[in-house]
Image (cartoon, grey):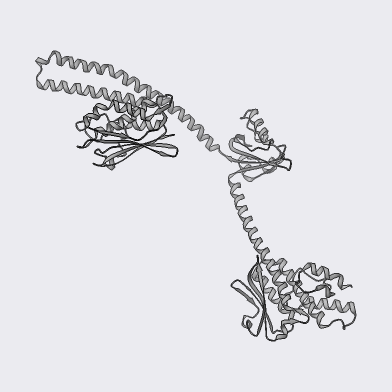
Amino acid sequence: MNLRKESDWVNNFIPIGTINSADADISLSGTDVSKPDSGGNFSRTRFVSSLLLAESDSSKFIDAGYQDRLQILGCLYKISSDMQIACSIDDLCKKLIVHISMVWYPCNEVFPYIKIGDRFFAQDETKHSLGSELSVPIRLDGETVGQLGINYKHLEYSNKGAISISDFLNSIALDFGDWLQRSKLRDIEAAYLGDVKMTERAINEHAIIAITDSRGKIQYVNQKFCEVSKYSTEELIGEDHRIINSGYHPRDFFLNLWSTISKGEIWKGEIRNRAKDGSFYWVDTTIIPLLDERGSPYQYVAIRTEVTAHKKLEAKMEEQVAELARSNDELEQFAYVVTHDLQEPLRAITSFVQLLKKYCNDQLDERANDLISHAVAGANRMQMLIDDLLTYAQVNASQTMTDIDCDHLLSNVLIDLSIIIDECEATVTCDKLPVIKGIPFQFVQLFTNLINNALKFKRAEPPRIHVGVGDNQNEWIFSVTDNGIGIEAQYIDRIFRVFQRLHSRKEYSGTGIGLAICKKVVEHHGGRIWVESEPNAGSSFYFSIPK
């Protein structure tokens, strides 16, 4: 047997630093590499020695140098084998200690050790740091992470014949660093794969996934697809999606779909499908083309979310909205008719009572005149109430929204209120107001009611009213602030309700509908209204209007 021919195989199988394996004519063919020797009797070295003796038929070639090389090559070979199968750093370090110690077998005065971070491995920790020490660094990503070394009692143990033990240890340390690097990468890969599997599981629990070829033939479906469609995987693979076509969508719908994805573009939309049992279900669908090097689709990945419940709820809501709109129209018409028809008999009652007073004034005593005055006042209040109800009913009347110059509109409102403003000696100031989209006469009602309230609910001092505005991203925030009597906290939630009054008619006039109209106007324009107030410190009414 030519041992030199085998040396290249050994050298390729395990790097051994500066040890020149080509100088050692050694054959390792026929050795068992599936389970490395634990170090008990160093059997591979004796086996290789017996092969060497059989080849030469003479013991004169078996000198100390060959024995040293055989021991070291055997050690490196076993270490290489262990590194290929080791998963635990503890297990690997323990085996390395055993293999390295066998280089000096049968001597037991050399003690290998490994330090990794704050962990220490040795056969006999009590012998550590006894006598001399030789160590080399273990590096990972260019940084020293540990030490590989030996402790020995006699100086001659620091070398093994003509072979440098430092090179021997460096060779193992380099391999160990590579193993740590691979282990680190395996841990990262395992963590990444774990995350991927968890993500895949989450997606499969939620989404319906299918992969088709360029012709639309189904190549893969996940379990969610089978659960929703009621078809098995075997029934779906090889078919196209016509198997679940419900016939709901027109032909042009799918022509557009295929036209989009065949150009390499993503398609999104909602599709109504039919399950195997004949039931229908809706899916929110995204189809993503996978393109080859020429930019042509070779596969399509369809990701769907079942939205059947949502579509049913949507249909029910549309029905309810339509019914609510119809009911609201009828209610508005009813309110208009009632309020309009009530006005004529009310005017007649007021006129007849006033005529009664005119023609019978000389015959009536003071008590009768008071009763007639109360009747006229009651009729007038009823007239105001009917007018306010008519205004409230008309707020939702469908009218075209136009541009409103709020500065100009507020000026007109203040002109209309000029008499009461002068009587109260009030001061009204305002910011520069924006142009908004809305129904002009409803905003006249809104500003009129808010400013009128500020004038009505005043304290002894003259009213000071400020109309302000703020820009809050997608909406304007208007405010009407006064120094009036304020509102107690427990009543703030009530003031925007119809007919809610916090004071008697003797104290403050009105029907209790004004702020309800304000709320309805603001909400009709897509905004919200609220108030901040303290008793005897004034109030600030805020309302928002989308831009």
- Camera-nearest residue between 432 and 83: 432
Q: Nearer the viewer, residue 482 or 335?
A: 482
Residue placed furthest toward the top: 359
From the viewer's perspective, tell me whether residue 332 is left or right of residue 274: left
Which residue is nearer to you in this view: 32 or 57?
A: 57
| Left or right: 88 in relation to 378 | right
Q: Is there any visible trace of residue 339 in the rendered image?
A: yes
Picture layout, residue 507 above or below residue 232: above
165 vs 358: above or below: below
Q: How many marks?
A: 0
Residue 29 visible in this rendered orientation of the protein: no
Quarter of the view holding residue 163: bottom right
Pick out the residue farthest to the front: 432
Question: Residue 27: horizontal and vertical position, in percent?
Answer: 84, 72
Instruction: Estimate the x, y position of residue 293 in percent, counting from the top left.
Output: 73, 43
**Which quarter of the figure has residue 481?**
top left
Q: Quadrant of the C terminus?
A: top left
Residue nearer the viewer, 406 or 244: 406
* Vertical relation: 179 (above or below) 212: below
Residue 245 location, x and y as percent?
A: 64, 33
Is residue 364 shown above or below 116? Answer: above
> Which quadrant holds the N terminus?
bottom right
Residue 395 x/y as whole percent = 37, 26
